[in-house]
Amino acid sequence: MPTIFTKIINREIPAHIVAENEMFIAILDINPLVLGHVLIIPKIEKDYIFDLDDDVLMEMNVFAKRISRAIQKTVLCKRIGVAVIGLEVPHVHMHLVPINTADDLNFTRPKLSPSQQNLAEIAEKIKAAL
């Protein structure tokens, strides 16, 4: 059964897409830790990041680097935190989270619930920074 991320990749369900190439898609997290929280998702459906082929893992990091620079131009923050947890959805995804303190990358904190309009505006700003 396809994951929610595969359904997004296949355009079966909507998402706020920030960037995409033949190997990856970058989308806004709809329940972010902070505004500007982006997910980097490979288009191949693997459950665990270290099951990815080395070249895919390398390219994922290069893709994430480009997106992180655009986020940093868009959202006031000191750094872009990176996390790979992989317990919520059985499809590899990397979190890029604008942070000012280490606590901004605390996944046990309550998530935000921004409006679709707010998400769309942030997505457009990140795209423009690319």
Image (tube, rainbow, N blue to C red):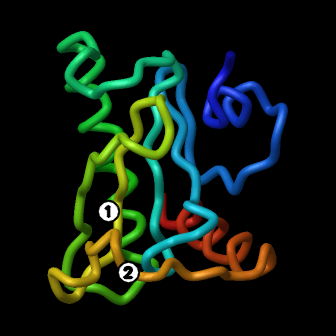
Disc 2 + disc 1, Cβ < 8 Å: no
| On-image quarter of the N terminus | top right
Q: Where is residue 19 in the image (x, y as percent from the top left)?
A: 56, 45
Name the residue nearer the viewer: 69 or 29.
Answer: 29
The three-letter amino acid code for the residue at tag 2 is Arg
What residue is at 45 percent from the left and 78 percent from the top? 74
The three-letter amino acid code for the residue at tag 1 is Arg
**Which residue lies most toward the top here?**
53
* Numbered disc in front, either 2 or 1: 2
Residue 70 quadrant: bottom left
Q: Position of residue 26 (x, y in %)?
A: 52, 46
Q: Is residue 57 left or right of residue 8?
A: left
> Dot 2 lies on which element?
loop
- Give how far apart the Cα atoms at labels 2 and 1 are: 25 Å
Q: Position of residue 100 (x, y in %)?
A: 22, 88
Position above or below: 52 against 42: above
Question: Looking at the rendered structure, which numbered label has been put on residue 69?
Answer: 1
> Dot 1 lies on which element?
helix
Q: Position of residue 125 (x, y in %)?
A: 59, 73
Name the residue nearer the viewer: 48 or 124.
Answer: 48
Residue annotated with mark 2: 109
